[in-house]
Amino acid sequence: MQKPFIEIAAKDMIIYPSEIQKPEGYVSPINYPDCCFAHRENFRLLTTYLDIFPRCCERHKEFYRKFKFNKHVVYKDFPIRILNTVEYTQYQISNVIKNDDWFEDISEYLEYAVRSLGQPAIGYHIFLELIESFINNKKSKIPIDKKKAILQLFEEQKNYSPKKEKSDLNLLYDIYKRWLNFFPFELSFYSHLKSKHFSTLPFIKETVKSNRYLGLVSFTVVTPSELVDFLFKKTVSMLSLINTVELVKEGKIDNAEKTKLDFINHSHQHKQKMLLAAFSKGEKKYIKTIKEWLDNEKYFFQDIVPIINQKKLSLEVRTNTHKYFQIKDSASRHYKANSLFDKLVIKNYLENGCKANFINAFTGTKSKDKINWIGDFGDLKSFIKYCDSEKLFNDSTAIWVIASEVFTIKKVNFVAKRIKDTKTTKNDYSIKKLVQSIY
């Protein structure tokens, strides 16, 4: 498949150096660069380096072998150009050091100066040494705190190393295309969002302020793992937007039979795609979430379609199901509910922020929001099963219906048949002990 992005490594390209503009107000010394010992010596140093280059190191030898350039053409003005860049940078630092935005200004000018050296930045090490020498010189009259900040900036420049996880645009594109392929945009609930998501690329992590000297805006691209994490959160958020139970109750599903078939088809297609593709560990999280959501909706519509078609339930019956459990013994009811919640949170079965809703749901009051179960689906079944078998509730009828009304699984709704039919997990026995421990 043809990749949409062309990526060229720095080692495979050459960018010719250029002269930067003279800062406003800068005046060259008379007879520059033959005006003083320092300028003469620095000019000699740069001239000597040009004579040796590219034999100075293996990296530059390889650079020469690859591009076969004429150094006397490409770098003909190297000594005076680097010396000018040093002069202009020193002048700029002295000129803005008292301004409120002195650090931003110097950072941007340094980037501007380094960019002018080309690719690779021949003479960069000499440029940096001369600027550091100027910063450390007492004659520069730079306050100690500002001097440390500028030198730290230089140190970061010298020691910069790319992230271990490379932000390859083509790799990011492949990850995003896989998500687009797996998210059920063909369902009527999400079809209006399809064009928006297919025409955008969520690769930019943050926008950075523009460089006043380069006239450019730089930005950071997300890493593959950051993109996958974003897509998982996006999946959960988008799936949570649709509450088919409420839509059915409100009569907003025009054709329940067609919707049932759509969910059956998408559930099958999703499983087929899972068999035919390879995924990273992070991608499996959102793929599993989509699979469970499709299965939940499929089971729900398989259950509800006959009821809708045969009109066996009135709107009143369908909308007034129980919304809570109620622990026996009013004297200890709140204590037991609190104890259950704390134990479930410690074991990482529940989100810590839903305590009020949990207490309400288990003491006979309709909770404001659903309780988010973050453990496995089978763990929730074990919990409800043992609450029932230990005779914890006043009324043990319709416990699976109530569970579907009270809980979500990782913020995804489910139906009574789905939790009733699911398998318990290896934590079944420990959950039994957890329930028994509150007595």
Image: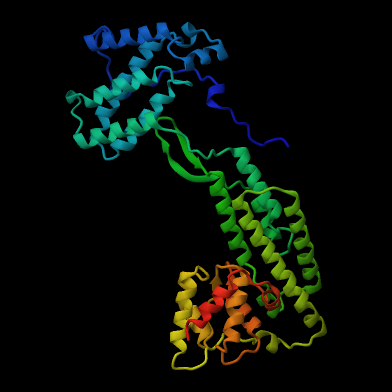
Residue 137, position as x, y percentages in the image: 20, 24
Picture quarter containing residue 415?
A: bottom right
Q: Is residue 96 above or below residue 75?
A: below
Rendered image coloring scheme: rainbow
Closer to us: 284 or 65: 284
Q: Can you see residue 143? A: yes
Q: Residue at x 25, y 37 (%)?
A: 99
Q: Residue at x 65, y 81 (%)?
A: 400
Q: Residue at x 32, y 20 (%)?
A: 86
Q: Residue at x 52, y 12 (%)?
A: 64
Count the numbered circles shown.
0
Closer to us: 89 or 427: 427
Residue 432, position as x, y percentages in the image: 56, 78
Q: Is residue 72 above or below residue 117?
A: above
Residue 355, position as x, y percentages in the image: 46, 76
Closer to us: 96 or 224: 224
Q: Is residue 23 above or below residue 270?
A: above
Picture quarter containing residue 97?
A: top left
Q: Can you see residue 323? A: no
Q: Is residue 111 above or below residue 20?
A: below
